Amino acid sequence: MRIIRTVTDLENYVAAARAEGRSIGLVPTMGALHEGHLSLVRKAVSDNDVALVSVFVNPTQFNNPHDLATYPRDEEADFRLLAGAGVSAVFAPTPEEVYPGWPEPAAPKVYDLGSAAEVMEGKHRPGHFQGVAQVVSRLFELCRPDRAYFGEKDFQQIAVIRNMIASEGIKVEIIACPICRADDGLALSSRNALLSEEGRREAPEIHRILGQSVEYSRTHSVRATHDSVVEALDANPMLEVEYYEIVDGRTLLPVEEWEESDWIVGCITVYCGDAAAPEKRVRLIDNIAYRTPSNH
Ligand code: PAF
């Protein structure tokens, strides 16, 4: 596995692969890799001649400096896992490489990300999706992938990236991959490493309550289903719901009736940890499908 640190080396690597007519699959990551990332990586390895993985904690998508400073990092372990998974090359640059002029780069471009970027994470993490669009479009420009792989835990991110490539006219196939879960149901996330022992014990409640709500939704309204999830999770002293929204799977806009769409997803963000120490709480996201179109 090649470890690439600079834009020049990456461009040369990609140009050589392209010249040989090899297809390229890209898995963008922020490192601290887990089985969820590896499931994307394995798909990229099997679908493409060249599987490229980026490991870059992108500072421009963090609206909270504490969150950026505490984001888990373990490059050596990441490289070991990627080599074991058959990755062709890993791009692990500094911010200076990715953003010319860093730490005072030129004013960033503003991307047209559609209304999907205005709700949920867009509302609670101002600037987050512009940062994601900035880094993902830069990675697409440098890696020129045929396909790019993203996990459905970040359901809204996938919709926003699809909007970004449509508005920028970027030709790349976006492959959305299912959420990977621990045996107790907790969605795998790099942030799980930050959970306290007690937090880790309680966090699977998120998926358990969401799962129960699917059954509940068969006989209750959207509003009642929404409220039942928030009430059940907020009753746990280790959990606090930041938002729960039941949305159309394509537009990401809230639905009021189950009949409104053939694709309805509940998207949640929960703070997990002791409310008396808010700076130690971990922000977890997850989602559940209430309706799934047959072609999904
Ligand atoms: O999902 C992530 O890990 C990040 O948002 C991404 C897509 C790698 C961009 O930094």
Image: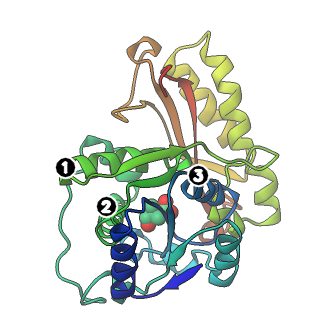
**What secondary structure is found at the residue carrying circle 1?**
helix
Label 2 CB-ligand 1 distance < 8 A: no
Q: CA distance from mark 1 to mark 2?
A: 11 Å
Q: Quadrant of the N terminus?
A: bottom right
Residue 129 in picture, x, y percent from top left: 34, 58
Question: Circle 1 is placed at which residue position?
Answer: 167
Label 1 CB-ligand 1 distance < 8 A: no
- The residue shown at (50%, 19%) is 294
Residue 257, relative to residue 242: is it above or below?
A: above
Residue 45, relative to residue 99: is it above or below?
A: above
Question: Circle 3 is placed at which residue position?
Answer: 43
Residue 279 visible from this viewpoint: yes
Label 2 is placed on what type of residue? Ala
Is residue 183 rendered to the left or right of residue 262?
right
Label 3 is placed on what type of residue? Lys
Label 1 is placed on what type of residue? Ser
Question: Circle 2 is placed at which residue position?
Answer: 133
**What secondary structure is found at the residue carrying circle 3?**
helix
**What secondary structure is found at the residue carrying circle 2?**
helix
Residue 284 visible from this viewpoint: no
- The residue shown at (29%, 82%) is 99
Mark with earlier residue (3, 2): 3
